Image (spheres, rainbow, N blue to C red):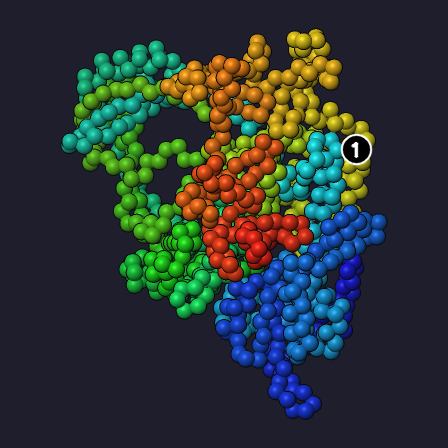
Amino acid sequence: MPKAKTTSKATSAKAKPASKAKSASKTRSTSKSGAASKKNLIIVESPAKAKTIKKYLGADFEVLASYGHVRDLLPKEGAVDTAHHFAMRYELIEKNAKHVASIVAAMKKAEALFLATDPDREGEAISWHIYEVLREKKVLKDKSVHRVVFHEITKSAVQAALDHPRDISMELVNAQQARRALDYLVGFNLSPLLWRKVRRGLSAGRVQSPALRMIVEREEEIEKFTSQEYWDLVAESTSESQDFTAKLTHYKGEKLEQFSITTAGQAEAVKKDLEMAAHGKLRVSRVEKKQRKRNPAAPFITSTLQQEAARKLGFTAQRTMRTAQQLYEGVDTGQGAVGLISYMRTDSVNLAAEAIVEIRHLIGERYGKANVPEEPRLYKTKAKNAQEAHEAIRPTSVIRLPESIKEFLNPEQYKLYSLIWKRTVASQMVSATIDTVAVDLECADKGIFRANGSVVVDPGFMLVYKEGIDDSKSDDEDRMLPALEEGHVVDLKALTCNQHFTEPPPRYSEATLIKSLEEHGIGRPSTYAAIIYTLQHREYAALDNKRFKPTDVGRIVNKFLTMHFTRYVDYNFTAKLEDELDEISRGEKEWVPLLQEFWQPFKHQVDEVAETVKRSDVTQEALDEKCPDCGKPLSIRLGRHSRFIGCTGYPECSYTRSVDDDKSDGISADIVEGRTCPQCSGPLQLKAGRYGKFIGCSSYPNCKFIESLNKPLDTGVDCPECHEGHMLKRKSRMGKIFFSCGRYPDCKYALWNEPVAQTCPKCAWPLLTIKTTKRRGTELVCPHTPCDFTKPMIDEEE
């Protein structure tokens, strides 16, 4: 097995190579005194995986989980020594120290070690770190060490892997070390620079920064967009007592484009001309019928699960992954905890052969043999830089119908399990058959109208599942048309003129942002939820009607990065780095030269910006306007929560106003219709102040009534103290997020950490909270004093 110091240089150890070791089924030994044989120790990364594998093995094997990574870089400057070949200094992760201690204790009693973590570079690095820890603890000695991999957790796959072990791949390990070093170097150099040039508490990341750029650029595109007016004409017709509509496509022999008719006057003139020519009738000039097949979507991978859960269930990426983790780790279905789905962080669209057999059998029994294709469906991944260490996300057994286990699941678990079950089953069903019809109707010699319709002849997979669509504007699916033949004359009931305006591209939702990141090759399945969480947690972007809108701070951070670090937030640069990491993992490229190539120009740029760029250059924007108080120039400046307009003569002149304020009085105000002030009965106004928009009394300053426009978000978690209200997500005056009972001030129960509707297993408190710290990572923590219950959550970042 390979050996490596806690630096970047890896060497070879003297452990027996896997290629020369006996297979697992033959690895046994007894003590000198003839005692019972020792066990073989198998290490995986998650307890759910350990539980599943244990079922397939005999008493000669002990299976333990590392609970993810066991070591990470020291959380301080110098952990990556750029002066000495990027030597990396690691330390044990505190929250996993007890799991490492269990592994060390078990290894002392074991005969052989089998490292069975994921077969990607992340899993390979975990195995290497475990090996290094055990070697440093001197518990390996002359014991054989094997690396085993399987791409699906089935009995046959596990047994085949144990019978064909290999060495740890240092190419995969070094690719992961390079990725970790890159993220560290970017974070530990850009983040302090942001603190000095913008404000304290900010951060920049190799992957999060391009994601922020996407959101800001989309917002700028929306702001620059100029809406254009256009009109269309629709014929409302009837045939054989069935109404249908058709859109005007040609007028006086010319094909109509989007902006052929741009005013109401033009539309009315065309309408009048057509009505006079039609005399209440339209003639069918052409009927085009086609039959097409629609294929089912591939089984879920991490990104598509997050996207579809956002579309269909309204789940955030974090909520999706948290619920999927629960389903994966196991739910008590009356006969003990059972893992209900396969591993949920994967790029692979493949299904285990055993699972396909079970799925096809279920389809035949439940939906009829006609819905089972002759051959199993095989899919190819479309994800760029896909890492296919696992199979696709699927139920561990499709025989567990969602409705049969509903009583054992909470609402979130049931919804997500049903979604995964339906998608998996549908992926192995026959295609849907759809008849489409396009009909042209002539209006004398003046115009042609087009009517489209379709009908599902054979639903196939659509019996079970139909994939959601992002930002769909129109869909002729299932629009029925009457039976029409060429030469038929139909009645024209009415002609309507419809006004339209072009719309800007929509803001990113969680689903479309993840899809865009995936298409650009930015990030990995395990990082999407973490990227989105960081953007919101740092208040770089906020969700507005489930769409991302950049904050003022987010805009300034993006402007700073794109202006001074253009190369490093470029989409192609980030994707190219992922390609190069893949080249390292295949042994086609060395990792230290890659880091050197990145580090030297990056460090030079950081130093240059630190010396030459002033804070005011980043946080202020000059305006061509004079201060009404002192006559000095005004500028847009970054305040504690948002941008505002202030005098450059500060502190001698303290004039300020909101960016949205009227110049005349410093406040923009619109009357709120249908409401009066509850304190003085005066009119209420929509106002804008330094901290955003709010509702205030028009009698200010005589009446100081105000009302926030930002309604707190309902988490849906019951208050554990009064058992009547829900816990609401709020923001303090200082901008810090907290959670409190919706019945405030009658109930004053409040928390700083996000509540989760899970009962504490130690003290039975009705809720737990999600707490994240640098040292301990993300944990489930009981907020009830004096209970000290904590439970690690699997990290969602690579």
Along the line of sight, the residue nearer the viewer: 477 or 644: 644
Q: How many marks?
A: 1
Give the residue displayed 61% in from the left and 17% down from the top.
Answer: 657
Horizontal relation, residue 793 to residue 496: left or right: right
Residue 155: x and y, percent? 49, 71
Q: Quadrant of the N terminus?
A: bottom right
Q: Locate residue 291, reporting x and y percent.
A: 31, 44
Q: Amino acid at mark 1?
A: Ala
At horizontal 31% and vertical 44% (from top left) the residue drawn is 434
The quarter of the picture where residue 47 lies is bottom right
Residue name at image x 64 percent, y 89 percent: 35
Image height of 433 relative to 559, above or below: below
User: Of all residues shown, which one is farthest toward the left?
Assistant: 240
The residue pinned by badge 1 equals 610
Residue 717 point in image, percent of width and height: 45, 46
- Note whether residue 787 is visible: yes
**Horizontal relation, residue 379 to residue 753: left or right:** left
Q: Residues within 10 Å of mark 1 (few under 14, many from 20)?
A: some
Quarter where residue 346 is shown: bottom right
Along the line of sight, the residue nearer the viewer: 393 or 310: 310
Q: Position of residue 146 (x, y in %)?
A: 65, 72
Q: Nearer the viewer, residue 779 or 287?
A: 779
Q: Does the rendering let one see residue 19?
A: no
Q: Give SS at disc 1.
A: helix
Q: Is residue 319 above or below residue 397?
A: above
Taking the image as shown, residue 191 lies to the left or right of residue 161, namely right
- Horizontally, residue 577 falls left or right of residue 725, namely right
